Image (tube, grey):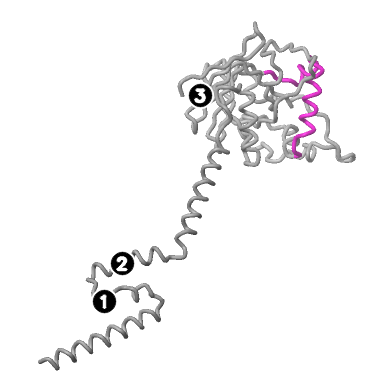
Amino acid sequence: MMLLRRLLMLYFSITSSALTRNIGVFGLTAFSRIPLSLSTSSAGQNFCEAKMSNSPTTAAEASDETTHTRDLQQQDTKDKDPELGQKSWRSLIEISMARSRKIRGSNYVQLATVDLEAMEPRCRTVVFRGFQKFPADHKNNSGACDDLSTVLKMCTDARSRKVQESPAGEIVWWFAKSSEQYRMRGKLLYVGGQNDGDDPELSKARKELWGNLSDPARESFFDQNVPGAPTTKTTATNDESAPAGGRDASAGKPLPPPDNFLLMLLFPHHVDYLNLKENYRQVDTFSKDESSWSFQQVNA
């Protein structure tokens, strides 16, 4: 009996030694430090602790996580809007435009007017072409907002229906990247055709805008098909009488703008600004008596 017990102990001793060597071959050297007298649960717990304390990637992973968190915090700070509640809409919209400058279509805005016959609203998308610049000594004869640094510039066809609608209009401009919305209410002014000579500065601005249009845009104003008119069998899909690119065929320079090309200006006097990321909203109003803007934070 004693002999059998000694043989069994010798067998288990040899087997345990071989197992330890085999585990070491496969790189699990932490097992070699676990005493054979430990229970299964104790061995498992000690192995996990040994593995964690000897892992060469633990410190690096912790460092990477800290760096990643810091980068996110810096990015969040960088993307935040400037000191809201301390800037007028004109300053805020410059920041909004700069953030979205490289996004195609970011200069498309929605213009709403009122059909005076039906007394119904009308809305369409137009292209914002910048803020109109005026000389410092320019006298505003439009009867609208006197702050000429806030005048929005667009263009349209004199034959389009919006020209015959209410001169009161509102533009909605949504910046998807920064989740900002501007609603700019004011008076529309059309420059061109019979009104071209009322203001020499505006007449000059109209011609400059005409020269800055793309060739397809210029060419479209020579199209004899009236915008919004019913399409008939005789309607030309491509008016051959329209000069290519709106240019002189021999000189290659842009032709003078036709009478139906209008410079369209919005003189805002009320701007509602909403920032969804910050849950912030403010309303800017222009006072003609004081010739200045004031703004107030309101509930979003």
Count of residue discs: 3
- Relative to 207, is 300 on the left or the right? left
In the displayed image of the protein, which residue is found farthest to the left? 1
Amino acid type for the residue under numbered disc 2: Asn
- Asked if residue 80 shows in the view, the reply is yes
Instruction: Find the distance from the CA under tag 2 to the CA under tag 1.
Output: 12 Å
Q: Secondary structure at mark 2?
A: helix
Label 3: how many Cα within 10 Å (few below 14, some 14–19, many 20+):
many
Q: Is residue 88 above or below residue 11?
A: above
Q: Is residue 214 on the magenta stretch?
A: yes
Q: Using the rendered image of the protein, determine whether residue 155 is visible from the camera's viewpoint.
A: no
**Disc 2 packing (10 Å; few <14; some 14–19; many ≥20):** some
Element at badge 3?
strand
Residue furthest to the right: 251
Say if mark 2 contacts mark 1, CB within 8 Å. Answer: no
Q: Is residue 220 magenta?
A: no
Q: CA distance from mark 1 to mark 3?
A: 70 Å
Residue that mark 1 sits on: 36
Q: Residue under circle 2?
A: 46
Q: Position of residue 226 (x, y in %)?
A: 67, 29
In the image, which residues are magenta?
189-215
The residue labelled by disc 3 is 281
Sooner in the amino-acid sequence: mark 2 or mark 1: 1
Q: Dot 1: what SS? A: loop
Label of residue 8 in the image: none
**In the image, residue 55 above or below residue 300:** below
Q: Are marks 1 and 3 in contact (CB under 8 Å)?
A: no
- The disc, 1 or 3, on the residue closer to the chain's N-terminal end is 1
**Observer-nearest of 123 and 202:** 202
User: 26 or 289: which is nearer to us?
Assistant: 26
Q: Residue at x 15, y 89 (%)?
A: 5
Amino acid type at circle 1 is Leu
